[in-house]
């Protein structure tokens, strides 16, 4: 049997061994003596379960960090903007609002067709109109009378004399207002006459706008008054003497009383 001498330990061993068996025993004994275990070297491969567990732990940590950062950011934003993040309360009343709409708030001015009118008898009417600026606002106009005992005004701006006096009629749109002075002379009952006096019209010539009205009346005489119009396409007259302009032109209003015919010229522009 052939032998070889180990250059490390000096022992001889058979050539059938690839390395010195005496050195291997000594190395093995030293490893176990120092508490080292086989298979724990740095080159050992990690198991698939261990890899998955590590990934899940890392993912959970990242998600938790994102949630914490989001919570802190939301809290800081709510402190800076409390009105935007306040929860809605069911049944809570809404804050008070102005009586006008957005269109009303955009009104910049009002222009009336007349700012001073005179009515001569009770029941006489005049149609006021209001031009609201800007036209695109589309705002509605509210009409009010300073003293309804002197003159009233309808929701459309029609002024009606009641008794003698001077008042203001107000037109309001949004925050803008405009006034018209209404003067009512001592009233006389429309269409009535006073016995022993010569019949006479309160006006013998009037000028109206289209859709504008004026009430004629007769004083004096002993009988009732009958009213008529020569051209009803220009103006109309009621049984109580209310004249209304219809279209541009000229016509005559006739009042028949005690066998007399009294005429008032009406011009419509």
Image: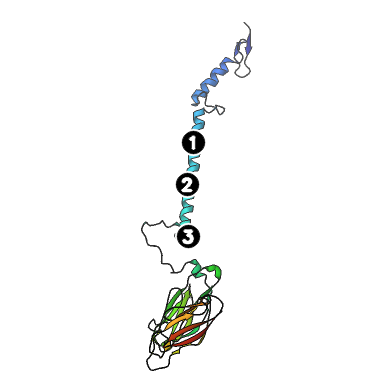
Marks 2 and 1, how far apart at CA: 17 Å
In the rendered image, the quadrant that contains the N terminus is top right
In the image: residue 103, left or right of residue 18: left
Question: Mark 3 or 1 closer to N-term?
Answer: 1
Camera-nearest label, 3 or 1: 3
The residue that mark 2 highlights is: 67
Most foreground residue, 228 or 35: 228
Distance (Cα) linking label 2 and label 3: 20 Å
Q: Position of residue 89 (x, y in %)?
A: 38, 57
Q: Which residue is mark 1?
A: 56
Q: Are marks 2 and 1 in contact (CB under 8 Å)?
A: no
Q: Count residues near mark 3 (Cα–Cα under 10 Å), then give few for <14, some for 14-19, many for 20+.
A: few
Q: Give the distance between the C-alpha atoms of the residues marked 3 and 1, in whole angstroms.
A: 37 Å
Q: Secondary structure at mark 2?
A: helix
Disc 3 secondary structure class: helix
Q: Is disc 1 surrounded by few (<14), some (14 to 19) or many (20+) residues within 10 Å?
A: few
**SS type, badge 1:** helix
| Residue wearing tag 3 | 80
Where residue 108 is drawn, which disc sits there?
none
* Nearer to the camera, 63 or 37: 63
Task: Look at the image and tell me in which quarter the C terminus lies.
Answer: bottom right
């Amino acid at each position: 049997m052939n032998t070889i001498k180990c250059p490390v330990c000096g022992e001889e061993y058979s050539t059938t061994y690839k390395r010195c068996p005496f050195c291997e025993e000594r190395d093995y004994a030293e490893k176990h003596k120092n508490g080292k275990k086989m298979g724990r070297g740095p080159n050992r491969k990690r198991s698939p379960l261990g890899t998955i567990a590590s990934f899940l732990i890392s993912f959970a940590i990242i998600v938790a960090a994102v949630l914490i950062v989001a919570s802190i950011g939301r809290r800081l934003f709510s402190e800076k903007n409390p009105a935007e993040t306040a929860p809605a309360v069911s049944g809570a009343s809404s804050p008070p609002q102005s009586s006008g709409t957005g269109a009303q708030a955009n009104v910049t001015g009002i222009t009336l067709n007349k700012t001073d009118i005179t009515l001569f008898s009770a029941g006489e009417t005049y149609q006021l109109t209001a031009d609201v600026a800007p036209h695109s606002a589309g705002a509605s106009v509210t009409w009010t009378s300073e003293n309804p005992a002197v003159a009233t005004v309808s929701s459309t701006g029609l002024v009606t004399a009641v008794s003698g006096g001077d008042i203001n009629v107000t037109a309001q749109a949004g925050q803008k207002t405009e006034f018209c002075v209404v003067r009512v002379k001592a009233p006389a009952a429309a269409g009535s006459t006073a016995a022993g006096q010569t019949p006479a019209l309160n006006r013998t010539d009037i000028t109206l706008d289209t859709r504008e009205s004026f009430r004629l009346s007769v004083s004096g005489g002993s009988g009732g008054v009958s009213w008529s119009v020569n051209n009803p396409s220009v103006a109309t007259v009621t049984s109580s003497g209310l004249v209304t302009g219809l279209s541009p032109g000229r016509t005559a209003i006739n009042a028949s009383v005690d066998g007399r015919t009294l005429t008032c010229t009406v011009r419509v522009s």
